Every structure is written in C-alpha cells, then in structure tokens.
Image (spheres, rainbow, N blue to C red):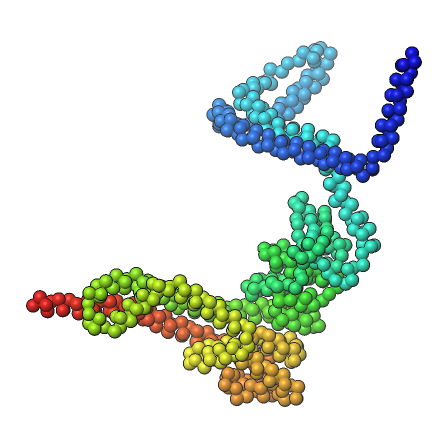
C-alpha cells in the first residue's frame, strides 16, 4: 500500500515537471510550429489541386478516343439525326397538356362514372428508349465526372478557407492602404518605383512597375485603370533593377508617334476627356516601354500637372517641338488642332526619310554585291591560274596581272583582319562623328561641297527648318523658344551656327533675315522669302511656302540621283569583274602564242 502511494506521488511530480517545462517553451517556437502547420496544409491543398488536374487531363485523354468512337456509332444507329432535347420536351409537354384537357373534359361529362386513377388514353404513344438514348446518358455522366470531383474539392473546408482568405485580402487592400497612408510622408516629394500585382476584369493577375510618390497613389491609379490591387511593395532591389535612376531613355519612333497623336486627336474631338483618351491609348499600344510612358503621363495629369509638363518630364520620349506646340495650344485651347498639325508635320518628315532610305537601298545592295563578287573572284578564281603563271617568265606576265595576283594573295592571307579593320574603322568614324563636334562640322562641310550630294543636304535642311519654323510661328510660340527648338531639331552644325547667329541678332534688336544673308548654305530664294515675310508680317505663311517648294526640289533631286547611281554601279560591277577576268586570261593567250611559235 505504501509503495503504491509512493509511486503515485512520483508520477504526479513527473507530470508537474513536464507541465512546467512546457510552459517554459518560448512562444515564438509555438508560432513557428503553427506556421509550419499552416504551410503544410497549404501544400496539401496545392497537391490536391495538382492531383485533381492531373487526373482530369489523364481522364480526358483516355476517354476522348472511346467517346469519339461511341458517338460515331450512336450517330450511325440513329441515322445521323441529332436528338433535339428541347423539341422532345415541348412535344411531351403538349401531349401532357392534351391529356390533362381530355381528362378534365371527360370528368365534366362523366362525373362520378369512372375512376380517373385507371384512365388510359390510347391516343398517347410512349416512345421507346433506344440504344442512342442510353449512350448519350452514359457520355453525359462520364463528362460530368470531373465537374463533380471539382465541386467536391471546392467544398473542402481548407479549400474554402484559402479562397475566402484570398478574397478577404483583396477586399481589405483599401483599408490597409488608408492606414499606411497616415504614416507616409510622401517620400519627401520624390517619386519611387513600386512593384504591383493587380487583378483585371478577367480575373488574371498582372505584375508591373510604376513610379509614384506613395502606395496610395499607385492604388488609386490602378483602380482608375479598372484593376483590383492585390499587392504593392517597394525595396532597394526594386529601385536598382526597375527604377528610373537616370530618367526615361526610350524615344518614341516617328511612325508610332503619328499613330498616337492621330488617335489622341480623334478621341479629344469626340468629347472624351484627355485622361480617358490616354487610358484608351494604353490599351491599344503593344510595346511595354510605350505603355509605361503613357501611364506616367496619365499619372502626372491625375495629380494636377499640365499635359505639356507631363510630356516634358518623359525626357527624350517626346520631341521638343511637340512639347512646345502642346504648351502653346494649352493657352489657346486648340489642342486637337495642334495635334493634327503635328501629325501632318511628322507624316511629311517620315515620308521624306523613307524616300531617302528607298533611294539608297538599291545602290547600297548593288555596291555590296559588287564587293562580294570581286572578293570571290580574287580569292577563289584567280588562285587557280597562279600555278600556270609560275611556269612562265615573270617578264612575260603583264604588270596588271601581277597586281591582281598580289591582291589575291593578300586577300587570302588577311581577309579576316581586313574585315575586322573595316568594321572597327566604320565604328570609330561613327563614334567620332556623333561625339566630336569639330570632326562632325568638317565632314558636313565636305559633304555639302560635293556637287550632287550638296543639293540633297541643303534642300533637306531648308525644308526641315522652314517647315518647323512655320509650325512654331502659326501656334504663337515665342521667337526665342522657336530658335531653341530649331537648334535641337537639326543635326547640321552649319545650320546650328546660323540659328545661333539669329538668336544673337534678336538680342541686339536686328532682324531674323540678317543671319541668313550671303550664306552659301542657305539659298537666296529662301532668304528673300524670309525678308518678305518680315516686311508683310506673314512670316509663317512664307516659311510654309518655302518648305513646300524645297521639299519638291529635294524629292526630285533624290529621284534623279537614284536614276543616275543605279546604271553607274552596274557599269562599275561589269568593269571590275571584266578587268579581273581579262587580267587572268590575257597571259594565257601570250602563253598559247609562245607555245605555238615553239611548235612552228
């Protein structure tokens, strides 16, 4: 008895120690265990979903051939007639209604004489269930199996909890953002990059990056786009990888800019607000960089910035000319008209550029083809005759043939290094042309003094200058701002010097035409039109006429050059290949005459 009591006390003491040790377990360990259990449950649910999808696809894959054969057999049995369920239902309802009416009529006529429970109408014929009916019933049940499995899985408590939690998190985003907004200090007026995950109207998740002052601004913008925000966050890694540290580097191409301006003008004329018009453009644009630029412009408009300032903040994306045109139209309220003028301007500019490319494409192809043919002949045809010439006296070989042979040997030994040197030389010249102003000025001066090329360059520069100047003046842009824009539009250093002289003359109070007087690079008719425009106060109209006139001259000159260069290149190709072949064949005739003389 004493031993049993002693053993019971020992057991109680051990239980007390175990309970004390359990109480000493840190709470964070318990929470860790709870998180691990939650993660295990989540993984279990995901595994169930994956298994369900696997079984579903395997089931479909195994049954579809059988289903196809059975359906084909059923159609053959039913003589290729589809069972119209709705028609059968309507016919059965009509028969039942007819039977009910007959029964009621019979009751009224013979009330109390018959037992309605044993009434049979022989006019009603019951259709027998054939094999096709049972086959359709089986197929319907087989196809419904995956849906029933999915329905059962959706009814599992864990799956419901995960789905409800996801919906709850989405609905509470607004509350969370509102609470976080109270602690934000707007990042001290600096825009940072945010990573967002949103859900569109189709239920698809969209991930992207957006520059804004705060999370609330991103959330408001996404709601305005018709998206439901699910997650918005930022970090230093996001700032480094996706942030616009150096500003926007993307420049919208002219053909894309024409499309955007045309669409935007059309929407504004239709009465659609500017922000909504930009949202429509965002949905139409395919390039992600263009979408990001338009989103940034829309965001600036929603926070109260002007349209011209929003365009200017995008850096090189939009031309300076367009920004100033929009700025002037904001003062006059003629934004659609300004956009239409810009569309016409950039359309004509793009057409002129395409004409130049078209004019240079064919001659460039012929020239490259000429080099390839000549190189091929020198490397693979001429060496075949070298062994024959070794048996001849070197004095009997013409000097031109020796030169061709030496060039052939040089190409065979150094063709790779020659190609590398040519590519490096071209890259070096291009780099120096873009970055060294003095070299660029010298090269442009040389090209502008070559007899035929100078007309193309001068006509093109005068056309661009007068067209841009006319557009700026017609939209009431200040003269000084117009000269600054003209200085940025042109890439010709000679014309930039004239524009800077114009700015200096305006600062001294002189006329605009004084900077273009007696300039070899500016035609006299164009100068006289500027003088006339200054005297009559119709400088914009005069510049427009100058641009039209010199644009036609430029087009005609390019066409003439194209027609002249093509036969020249063909003649050059013929002459080069023919000269090489003659240099190879002529010594053979000399050898033949020597052999014939020795035989005689």
Viewer can see residue 403: yes
Of residue 14 and residue 165, the one placed in the foreground of this image is: 14
What x and y, as percent, mark residue 257? 58, 64
Measuring 59% from the left and 64% from the top, which residue is drawn there? Answer: 251
Measuring 74% from the left and 31% from the top, which residue is drawn there? Answer: 157
Q: Quadrant of the C terminus?
A: bottom left
Measuring 22% from the left and 71% from the top, which residue is drawn there? Answer: 394
What x and y, as percent, mark residue 497? 57, 82
Q: Quadrant of the N terminus?
A: top right
Is 85 on the left or on the right of 243, as rendered? left
277 in relation to 464, above or below: above
456 in relation to 161, above or below: below
The number of callouts visible is 0
Of residue 364 and residue 517, the one placed in the foreground of this image is: 364
60 in relation to 517, above or below: above
Is 589 on the left or on the right of 99, as rendered? left
What x and y, as percent, mark residue 314? 66, 65
Measuring 58% from the left and 67% from the top, which residue is drawn there? Answer: 343
Q: Would you identify the image quadrant in which residue 160 lies?
A: top right
């Amino acid at each position: 008895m004493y031993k049993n009591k002693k053993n019971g006390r020992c057991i109680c003491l051990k239980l007390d120690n175990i309970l004390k040790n359990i109480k000493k377990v840190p709470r964070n360990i318990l929470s860790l265990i709870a998180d691990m259990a939650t993660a295990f449950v989540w993984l279990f649910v995901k595994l169930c979903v994956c298994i369900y999808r696997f079984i579903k696809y395997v089931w479909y894959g195994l049954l579809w051939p059988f289903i196809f054969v059975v359906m084909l057999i059923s159609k053959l049995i039913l003589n290729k007639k589809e069972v119209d369920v709705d028609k059968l239902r309507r016919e059965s309802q009509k028969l039942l209604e007819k039977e009910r009416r007959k029964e009621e009529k019979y009751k009224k006529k013979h009330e109390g004489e018959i037992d309605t429970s044993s009434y049979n109408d022989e006019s009603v014929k019951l259709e027998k269930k054939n094999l096709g009916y049972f086959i359709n019933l089986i197929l319907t049940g087989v196809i419904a199996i995956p849906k029933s499995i999915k329905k059962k899985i959706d009814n599992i408590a864990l799956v419901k909890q995960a789905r409800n939690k996801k919906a709850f998190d989405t609905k509470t985003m607004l509350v969370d953002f509102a609470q976080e907004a109270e602690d934000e200090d707007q990042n001290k007026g600096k825009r940072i990059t945010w990573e967002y995950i949103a859900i569109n109207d189709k239920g698809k998740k969209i991930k992207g990056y957006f520059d804004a002052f705060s999370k609330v601004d991103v959330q408001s913008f996404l709601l305005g786009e018709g998206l439901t925000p699910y997650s918005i966050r930022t970090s230093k890694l996001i700032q480094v990888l996706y942030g616009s540290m150096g500003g926007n580097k993307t420049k919208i191409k002219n053909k894309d800019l024409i499309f955007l301006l045309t669409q935007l003008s059309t929407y504004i004329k239709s009465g659609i607000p500017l922000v909504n018009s930009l949202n429509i453009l965002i949905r139409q644009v395919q390039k992600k960089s263009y979408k990001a630029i338009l989103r940034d412009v829309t965001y600036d408009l929603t926070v109260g910035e002007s349209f011209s300032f929003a365009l200017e903040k995008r850096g090189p994306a939009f031309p300076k000319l367009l920004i100033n045109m929009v700025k002037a139209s904001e003062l006059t309220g003629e934004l659609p008209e300004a956009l239409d003028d810009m569309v016409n301007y950039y359309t004509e500019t793009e057409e002129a550029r395409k004409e130049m490319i078209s004019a240079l494409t064919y001659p460039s192809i012929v020239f490259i083809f000429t080099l390839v043919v000549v190189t091929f002949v020198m490397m693979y045809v001429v060496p075949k005759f070298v062994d024959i010439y070794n048996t001849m006296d070197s004095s009997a070989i013409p000097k031109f043939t020796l030169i061709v042979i030496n060039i052939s040997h040089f190409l065979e030994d150094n063709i790779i290094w020659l190609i590398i040197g040519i590519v490096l030389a071209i890259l070096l010249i291009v780099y120096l042309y873009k970055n060294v102003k003095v070299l660029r000025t010298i090269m442009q001066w040389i090209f502008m003094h070559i007899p035929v090329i100078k007309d193309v360059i001068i006509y093109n520069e005068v056309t661009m200058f007068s067209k841009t100047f006319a557009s700026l003046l017609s939209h009431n842009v200040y003269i000084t701002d117009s000269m600054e824009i003209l200085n940025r539009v042109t890439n010709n250093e000679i014309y930039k010097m004239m524009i800077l002289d114009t700015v200096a003359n305006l600062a001294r109070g002189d006329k605009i035409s004084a900077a273009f007087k007696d300039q070899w690079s500016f035609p006299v008719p164009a100068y006289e039109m500027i003088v006339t425009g200054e005297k009559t106060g119709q400088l914009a109209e005069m510049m427009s006429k100058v641009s039209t006139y010199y644009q036609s001259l430029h087009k005609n000159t390019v066409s003439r050059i194209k027609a002249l260069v093509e036969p020249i290149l063909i003649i050059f190709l013929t002459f080069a290949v023919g000269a090489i072949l003659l240099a190879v064949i002529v010594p053979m005739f000399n050898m033949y005459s020597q052999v014939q003389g020795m035989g005689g």
